[in-house]
Amino acid sequence: MVTMYRLPRWFEGHGNAWLRAAGVCGLGLVLADICHGRPAPGLSGAHLVVLIGIVLASLAWLAHGPAGAVDHRIMVLVLAAGMTGGGLVTLASPSSAALALPGVIGLLAGSSLSLPEAAGVAACGLATFAAGSLAGAAAGGFPCPARAWW
């Protein structure tokens, strides 16, 4: 058998740590972009929605790594809560980086859960986005991502 790809020497044996560090750096970049957007996280109104969504989505993003130590049912609930939080951030903070939160959580769910469980996690994000879009339409305007789609 011929190996077509070989990991660099510095990566061998430490692959999981490097991937984990890359994930934390990616999350940091996404959060930095969201925090410099409008509205910034805070303690009232849309600011509070962004803050709660960031906390839920960040916990889901970071908790996925040590999933072997956590009960499988708890991981499904954590990813569903993270998907809901990512959807809230996407609706409240109209930056392109905010779309990465539910996208990455959906990728994590799809790669580590069974199909019905991953579909349930995705449905949480879709339900959050649909409810937020309807609430925005009822208030007189669409949230930013829905404006382009409707």
Image: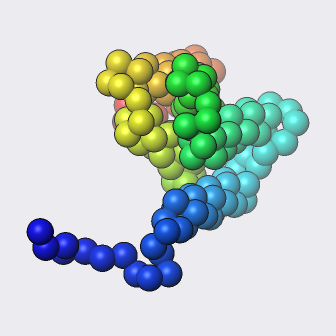
In the rendered image of this protein, does residue 5 appear above or below residue 17? below
- Residue toward you, 35 or 46: 35
In the rendered image of this protein, does residue 74 appear above or below residue 146? above
Q: In which quarter of the image is residue 148?
A: top left
At a point 63% along the width and 59% down the height, the residue shown is 24
Most distant residue in the right direction: 43
Residue 1 location (% of width, % of height):
11, 68
Q: Viewed as shown, does residue 53 lie left or right of 75?
A: right
Residue 11 location (% of width, % of height):
47, 75
Q: In which quarter of the image is residue 28?
A: bottom right
Most distant residue in the left direction: 1
At a point 36% along the width and 25% down the height, the residue shown is 114
Most distant residue in the bottom direction: 9
For residue 36, say whether it is visible. Answer: yes
- Residue toward you, 112 or 11: 11
Q: Viewed as shown, does residue 38 lie left or right of 106?
A: right
- Residue toward you, 53 or 74: 74
Residue 13 location (% of width, % of height):
49, 68
Which corner quadrant holds the C terminus?
Answer: top left
Label total for image:
0
Residue 50 location (% of width, % of height):
71, 39
At a point 84% along the width and 42% down the height, the residue shown is 42
In the rendered image of this protein, does residue 54 appear above or below residue 24? above
For residue 87, say whether it is visible. Answer: no
Q: Quadrant of residue 2?
A: bottom left
- Residue toward you, 39 or 13: 13
Q: How was this image coloured?
A: rainbow
